Amino acid sequence: MSAASGNRRVWVVDDDRSVRFVLATALRDAGYEVDGFENAASALDALQVRGVPDLLFTDVRMPGEDGLRLLERLKAAHPHLPVVVMSAYTDVASTAGAFRGGAHEFLSKPFDLDDAVALAARALPAPASSAPGASPSQAEPDAAGSTATAHELIGDTPAMRALFRAIGRLAQVPLSVLVTGETGTGKELVAGALHRESPRASGPFVALNTAAIPAELLESELFGHEAGAFTGANRRHVGRFEQAHGGTLFLDEIGDMPASLQTRLLRVLAEGEFFRVGGRELIRVDVRVIAATHQDLEARVAEGRFRADLLHRLDVVRLRIPPLRERRADIPLLAATFLHRAAHKLGAGAKNFDPAALAALQAMDWPGNVRELQNLCWSLAALAPGETITAGDLGMLQAPAAASAATPPVEWDRQLGQWALQSLQAGARDLHAQARMRFEQALLNAALQHTGGRRVEAAALLGVGRNTVTRKLGPGRKRR
């Protein structure tokens, strides 16, 4: 390696001798002076004799004091020492705890030795004294967040490990985050984790699905209203921004927000202040906004349906949640966790999946992502007859959905073609207009049936505007 690594001292603290050996060897080959320690106590003792190293790698789970406790003690005595935390247990609580304690980086085991050496090179060039106060907040861990089970993100694939590391780091900084991902991937879980592991954890976490609120009510829901502001406003209503003061506001499906409200939201993000609907008192709030969408906001900006300046305010940092089909290796863990929780909640006996059932689950595409898998596990906990879930049990519950998912639109295409041929043979004209009208009506009716008649939600699911739904249904259909 270059002379820049010469005489730079790196310590490796890990109770696993093989990890100490291979990492120390790789770092020595790169030109560093390396010492290894099997526990936190021996490393702390060495500090008194050998002085402070330039960089320290530490495992989390070790006999005696763990790596996070070692990190805490090192940062208290030597705040500018870069510490890389290593662990085979990569979850939000571990990564957030590391970054909250001041870790320079979190390295998931097993790791590539080249990546570890490159990380050492990035951590060492700048002298530690050049960045006073750059370590993350030293807030105490959130006990409620660390013990939560039903609301945690689950996964051990590289994509999820990267997501956990990003959440752990971003939780400590007061930046707006835009969470993107398909429906059912867990965008609200990511927002909740960012809140729980942040210095705002003691404040409220308020969530609002902007697509589920009619446009005429959304302004009041966000900013509140004064008594008499409009018909039916009999008393003052405190909006979600005020409710989230001192905490975090999660705005789901932000891409569906009406243009007029986008302007108001932009001002709140820029100035931290607003007026209630019908009010004259300027309300000031301290809120971290996390937004989420399954839509392509850049495309909506290009179409003139979303403000570019609002996107820039929301999209300071973007987190993409991978769909379940991109992390199939997580499906057995997710399925087992959901099945256990469901059985416990329902008071049913413990159940598990046999290998064939797990293989079948991993072969599915899961258009509804983690939420769809969770719903299936609840059904299996309630309806599967035996303690062991088989592929046959999956077929029993998945038959209608699997058939529709496995059969592309060939059948209705064929029926449409047959109808068109028969109509043409009978001398019909204007088939395109007839087919289009019936096609759109069928889609709208299905979406409204799925949402219980809620037009705004149906429009969002179909990817059309609410006015389009209203126009095509006509005035006779009951508005919801």
Image (cartoon, helix red, strand yellow):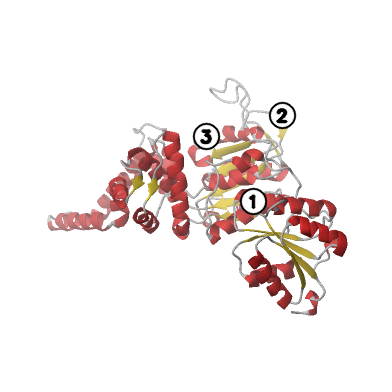
Label 2 sits on residue: 281
Residue 80 tag number: none
> Residue at label 3?
216
Q: Secondary structure at mark 2?
A: loop
Say which amino acid is labelled 3: Glu
Q: Position of residue 205 (x, y in %)?
A: 62, 38
Quarter residue 258 falls in: top right
Labels 1 and 3 touching (C-beta < 8 A): no
Residue 99 appears in view: no
Q: Nearer the viewer, mark 1 or mark 2?
A: 1
Kindly report the distance in space between the C-alpha atoms of the residues bearing marks 1 and 2. Answer: 43 Å
x 61%, y 50%: residue:
92
Mark pair 1, 3: CA separation = 43 Å
What is the three-letter code of the residue carrying label 2?
Answer: Glu
Residue 287 on image: x %, y %: 68, 40
Label 1 belongs to which residue? Answer: 94
Question: What percent of the width, then of the height, locates residue 318?
Answer: 60, 55
Q: Residues at badges 3 and 2 in contact (C-beta under 8 Å)?
A: no
Mark toward the start of the polypeptide (1 vs 2)? 1
| Category of crowding for the residue at label 3, using alpha-carbon neighbours closer than 10 angstroms: few (below 14), some (14–19), many (at least 20) | few
Inspect this view and state whether residue 452 appears: yes
